[in-house]
Amino acid sequence: MNTHPSRHDDPLRILEVLVGVVVTVMAVLALATVAGTVLGSGSVPGLDAEVCATASGDQLGFRQGEDGRTGPAHLDEGITWRADEVQVCDPDPDVATRALGGAGLLVWVGGPAVFFALLWRFLRRARREGVFADRVPGQLRTLGRVLLMWAALDLVLSGWVEAALVQRMTDSPFAVSATVPWVPLLLGVALLALAKVMEQAVEMRHDVEATI
């Protein structure tokens, strides 16, 4: 009886196809979104040309109205409000604003696109050469490093781009507010640890083969 999985029910083959579809969709969406942001809605039908940025409420320095209150609507007596994050948008941005918006989107979508492309390559090699092949630990290590580099870029560049956009759209000073991207950071560390485990598994395979 044939115990090897066929091409249709091979789990690695199914994962390879699914990740390949994700990579293709992400590439198309990334190119369309970046092009639409940088060039305007006329270049990609259906995409809005406006560029938006997110900042804290304190950073934007909201002004009080004539009644001494500041808020999105009329507030009852004694009711306060706060804006932890506020989005400002430029419906008719200039070239520099579009370039900053495109750079922010490139950082946001570039890391996942590269990661899933490498993941597809990793699954393809693991399916063809085996999960304990010599090059599997190295590719897992590469995946982990890519996630860590994306987390670093997202931490530094995304905050800088948002601050630059807010400064261009308002009279607020240039103030960078960074948020730690915990998901890619923790996944990157986990993949590096898994790569170390797989490296030891490959060494054990070599030892077993040497005794046969």
Image (spheres, grey):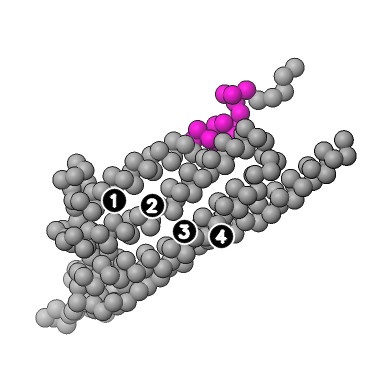
Picture coordinates of residue 182 (x, y %)?
Answer: 50, 62
Identify the mark nearer the N-term, 4 or 1.
Answer: 1
In the picture of the structure, the residue carrying the numbered disc 1 is 34
* Element marked by disc 3: helix
Identify the mark nearer the N-term, 2 or 1.
Answer: 1
Q: Quadrant of the N terminus?
A: top right
Kind of residue at badge 3: Trp
Q: Residue furthest front?
A: 210
Whether 110 is drawn above or below 123: the answer is below
Q: Please identify, in this view, whether the residue under mark 4 or under mark 2 is nearer the observer.
A: 2
Picture coordinates of residue 29 (x, y %)?
Answer: 33, 43
Disc ID at residue 101 = none
Asked whether 187 or 136 is in front, the reply is: 136
Q: Which residue is depicted at the point 56% across and 36% down?
A: 124
Identify the mark nearer the N-term, 3 or 1.
Answer: 1
Kind of residue at badge 2: Val
Identify the mark nearer the N-term, 3 or 4.
Answer: 3
Q: Which residues are magenta?
A: 6-18
Disc ID at residue 109 = 2
Picture coordinates of residue 77 (x, y %)?
Answer: 23, 78
